[in-house]
Amino acid sequence: MSLPEDYLRYPLRRRGMDQDRYEWRPRADAPRRAWPNGAKVAACIVAPLEFHMLNPSGKPFKHPGAMQTPYPDLRHYTTRDYGVRVGAFRLLDALKRHRVRITFAVNAVLLTRAAPLIEAITADGHEIAAYGWDTDTLHWGGLVETEEAARVDKVRAAFAAAGLAPRAWLSPARSQSFATPDIVRAAGFDICLDWEMDNTPVAMRTAAGLLHCVPLSNELDDRKLLIDQRQTEEEWRAQILEANALLQSEHDRFGGQTLAFTLTPYVIGQPFRIWALDALLSALATDDAVWTATASELVEACA
Amino acid sequence: MHADPNLYDYWPYRDRPRIAWPGGKKLAFWVAPNIEFYEFDPPANPSRPGWPRPAPDVVGYSQRDWGNRIGHWRLMELLDKYAIRGSISLSTALIDHHPEIIEACVARRWEFFSHGIYNTRYSYGMSEAQERAMIEDSIASVEKATGQRIRGYLAPALTHTERTFDLIAALDFWYTCDLFQDDQPQPLKTKSGKVVSMPYSLEVNDVITYGAMAMSPWRYADVLKRHFDQLLQEGERSGVVMCIPLHAYLVSQAHRIRPFEEALRHIASHADDVWFATAVEIAGFYREHCWDQTIADIDRRGLARPGVGFAP
């Protein structure tokens, strides 16, 4: 038995990337970013708001946080719903206390399902990003391009119906097809939160124009650290502040960099965890070297 | 299959009408010892095995038996020390297997509610008649043994059907511990009856914290204190509920019970602001004093939707 002959052919073996969305650029060649008021680090916080239905197809894979026990898995349905009903308001209170504005990435179905929350978010001056249709409508390589475009258009229309015109896009489960950047850019989204290949935003080529990729950290994801990896709230908080200190220490050499991380309401919004968010926001908000920015403000500062 | 159970309506946590618990207390606190019986050789359920390993799972079985022989007694003494009455999530077959435990709880005026017959008999796949028979058996068994008419439900091993809540509503249950969407009670949308969704907890449930979340005894105590402190602070605006669900085969272990006591001591030291209650007392108060104002507020500021849970 052997593999086909072309398995040992390497047609894209060349200097640079093996795709043409963006150029290879080692950090020595990166442009120096200057953040407002001489800040050294831009903290860009993203809160994902997810609808976890009782009956997900789980195809082609289960979204993180999806149902786990046989139907009706009310246990996981209600623990996820807690985030949208209770946890998100705890987040809003903490953000208001420290005068920090962030980007809420919203599953389109929540625009109606949790309309009072959406109103509270916009009233507090936060940015709204589109987060696909719901957690079971995944964008992935097996989708027909026209079908994916129809999904994105449907999301755009739902936001328009709610009086919202988001610039930023986050894919459910941060999963894309090869065509997703072209499709979301064509639908009017010029900021994307899925790719994290650099320390500041990178403009990606699409068929419809440039798509600015804000590097949201997967390694600092609160759900991953606190639930999957069972770390403590103190460890979570300390890691983000450690990243902040490191990025500040590099400022003289590399200029302003980005610290982008998630706050998942059903995770960090728990009563026993919210103290850590309060402590973290206090540290960031009182640090003159930190500029807290929404995704759009961050991209504007790089223009 | 439904995407949304429609068992309750969306209701934003901010700016809710004020709940003042009896005596003007801010936080209703209750402890739920799960007193369970897991069968040595349970019958098969098509949706889930009785034990993670093929039966006999001797470590799993004997650890739970340790909970019944040693653990509950240690936990009862601890709760006595702080004058806390438990609300027992009971595998009602335990009445037959271990009557001494039931007698000890009755002597303490603890509350009983149904956690099914055995924690190894799941609701998955039951017909309506079977599920009703299981619940009616719970009611009759507890009434016969203790004189108490049970008013609360926690489905065995958290296994449900689409009919569970209508069944308990029709049998005049006052509350269910099966839903985790809130830190305040809320009316459930059932075909009949008046069932309150009672905040229980998975996040601070010892099965989750010691098991899935792999917490040390001291970390669990810290989590409980922080959980309590935050909820008590929010209780200034409108009364909240905090429950600590416990399993003696876990929390009563020699390496865990003293750190756990530290959390209990912390909570007990706030007696001025805390209503130490049983679940049925909280549900009874809520049904009488808070049910209507909640529904009115959901109509005003929430998203009331027609229909009842799992309606076709």
Image (tube, coloured by chain):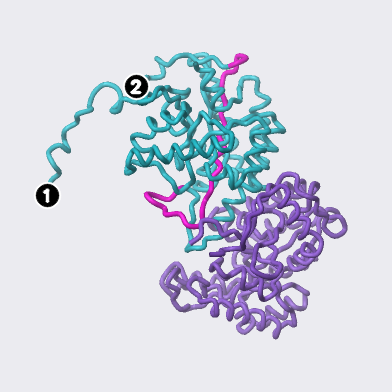
Chain colours: A cyan, B purple
Q: Which secondary structure lies at badge 1?
A: loop
- Residue labelled with disc 2: A24
What residue lies at 71% left-to-right and 67% top-to-bottom?
B194
Name the kind of residue labelled 1 in the image: Met
Q: Are marks 2 and 1 in contact (CB under 8 Å)?
A: no
Disc 2 is placed on an element classified as loop
Q: Quadrant of residue A27?
A: top left
Ranked by sequence position, the earlier of labels 2 and 1 is: 1
Q: What stretch of residues is rendered in magenta?
A: A36-63
Q: How far across and down, in percent of the image, does residue A50 sit?
A: 54, 45
In the rendered structure, the answer to whether residue A44 lies left or right of residue A95 reads left
Looking at the image, is A280 positioned above or below residue B122?
above
| Disc 1 crowd, CA 10 A, few/some/many (<14, 14-19, 20+) | few
Q: Chain of mark 1?
A: A
Find the distance from the CA under tag 2 to the CA under tag 1. Answer: 37 Å
Q: Is residue B109 visible?
A: yes
Q: Which percent across, then down, holds residue A171? A: 45, 38
**Residue A123 position in % (x across, y down):** 68, 33
Q: Nearer the viewer, residue A139 or A266?
A: A139
Q: Nearer the viewer, residue B198 or B142?
A: B198
Assess whether residue A47 is covered by the magenta stretch: yes
| Residue on which disc 1 sits | A1
Is A95 placed above or below B280 here? above
